[in-house]
């Protein structure tokens, strides 16, 4: 239900494999019954004078208004707020999380409010994601989880330190001179006091093995327990070269990402099949236009890259026309930033197609 959104958050905001748990924690916070469920969550935004923005999200669609990072901070920031919980549990950059949540909120609220009304319950798939997110919210923060382990390492040596100190005090006491015996009484020969036994130090599991006294093979250290496998699913791999990816944008409308080989403008042969949903939507919505924007990686000459981005956008425009879209319903739009806008060079060599009404 949210797979495309999660992949977009992973690449667009640098969250990588943390995009899934961020979404899970957001859903848990949004649907928490103790705070009024989804209706209670939306009331927080209305209380911050963001009611018109929230209203535009209900039911989804092209009228959904964006929300800024500062507005997200106003509602979800603060001590103990969602942003603090996510950053402390997942050890991720707060600005990246704030931007990702601003991107996710309109689309998620739109899909959870079909027909523009807030439901009493959420679909089972959403409930499952929220349950996983609730477990993450209840877990200790990364710093708090590390503190007991550090303390335990000191405490396990404390008994031996106490015993050793007591033994040293005993030895010091026994070493003191006793008063000279009476001259008329021959002193009795006394056996020297046996020093108190000091227990051998315990070798930590991480210390290298030591050779046995008999010259045999060294003792092998106890093996450390295997690290548990990660329960967080990794996002889908980015295309390494020419490819076409169909997706649903934040306004719940079909969109495309067309990737290119380095220095090339050839559109992948899958374009007709991958663009079918977008073309069908445009045929059903005559007021929709396809906005086409080209991007490039940061390598090479800047002027040549700008021309390459333009040529790629024109190639995608031609492919849309071949797929049945009238050319006057396509718009070539140069983005504010065209270079290095993705996590890798391969992901930066792309053209994006979004619908606008």
Image (cartoon, rainbow, N blue to C red):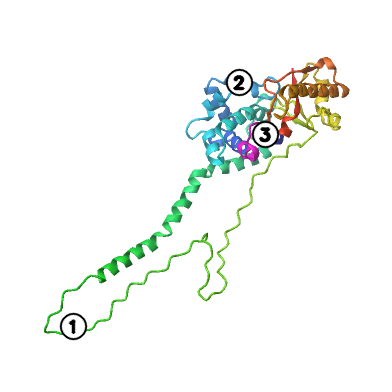
Question: Is 246 displayed left or right of 98 in the figure?
Answer: right
Question: Is 156 displayed left or right of 284 in the figure?
Answer: left
Residue at the spot of label 1: 187
Mark 3–mark 2 distance (CA, rounded to whole Å): 30 Å
Residue extending farthest to the top is 328
- Disc 3: CA contacts within 10 A as few (<14), some (14-19) or many (>=20): some
Regarding residue 132, the answer to whether it shows in the image is yes
**Figure check: 160 above or below 337:** below
Q: Quadrant of residue 320?
A: top right
**In which quadrant of the rendered image does the C terminus lie?**
top right
Nearer to us of marks 3 and 2 is: 3
**Figure check: 267 above or below 139:** above
**In which quadrant of the rendered image does the N terminus lie?**
top right
Nearer to us of marks 1 and 2 is: 1
Residue at the spot of label 2: 53
Please tell me which of labels 1 and 3 falls first in the chain: 1
Of helix, strand and loop, which one carries label 1?
Answer: loop
Of helix, strand and loop, which one carries label 3?
Answer: loop
Tag shown at residue 343:
3
Question: Which residues are drawn in magenta?
Answer: 7-22
Mark 1–mark 2 distance (CA, rounded to whole Å): 101 Å
Q: Residue at x 16, y 85 (%)?
A: 186
Mark 1–mark 3 distance (CA, rounded to whole Å): 89 Å
């Amino acid at each position: 239900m949210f797979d495309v959104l999660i992949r977009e958050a992973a690449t667009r905001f640098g969250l990588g494999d943390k995009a899934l748990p961020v979404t899970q924690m957001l859903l848990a916070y949004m649907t928490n019954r103790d705070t009024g469920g989804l209706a209670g969550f939306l009331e927080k935004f209305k209380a911050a004078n963001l009611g018109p923005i929230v209203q535009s999200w209900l039911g989804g669609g092209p009228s959904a208004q964006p929300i800024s990072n500062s507005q997200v901070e106003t509602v979800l920031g603060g001590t103990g707020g969602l942003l603090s919980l996510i950053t402390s549990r997942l050890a991720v950059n707060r600005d990246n999380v704030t931007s990702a949540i601003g991107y996710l909120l309109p689309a998620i609220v739109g899909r959870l409010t079909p027909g523009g009304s807030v439901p009493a319950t959420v679909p089972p798939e959403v409930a499952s994601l929220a349950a996983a997110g609730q477990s993450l919210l209840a877990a200790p923060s990364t710093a708090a989880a590390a503190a007991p382990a550090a303390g335990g390492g000191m405490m396990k040596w404390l008994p031996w330190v106490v015993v050793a100190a007591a033994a040293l005090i005993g030895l010091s006491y026994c070493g003191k001179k006793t008063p000279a015996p009476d001259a008329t009484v021959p002193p009795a020969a006394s056996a020297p006091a046996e020093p108190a036994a000091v227990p051998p130090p315990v070798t930590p599991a991480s210390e290298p093995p030591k050779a046995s006294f008999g010259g045999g093979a060294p003792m092998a250290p106890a093996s450390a327990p295997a690290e548990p496998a990660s329960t967080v699913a990794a996002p889908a791999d980015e295309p390494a070269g020419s490819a076409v990816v169909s997706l649903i944008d934040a306004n719940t409308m079909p969109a495309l990402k067309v990737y290119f080989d380095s220095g090339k403008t050839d559109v992948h042969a899958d374009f007709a099949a991958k663009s079918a949903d977008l073309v069908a939507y445009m045929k059903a919505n005559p007021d929709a236009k396809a906005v086409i924007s080209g991007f490039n990686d940061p390598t090479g000459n800047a002027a040549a890259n700008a021309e390459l981005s333009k040529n790629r956008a024109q190639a995608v425009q031609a492919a849309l026309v071949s797929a049945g879209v009238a050319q006057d319903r396509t718009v070539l739009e140069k983005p504010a930033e065209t270079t290095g806008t993705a996590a890798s060079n391969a992901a930066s060599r792309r053209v994006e197609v979004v619908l606008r009404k």
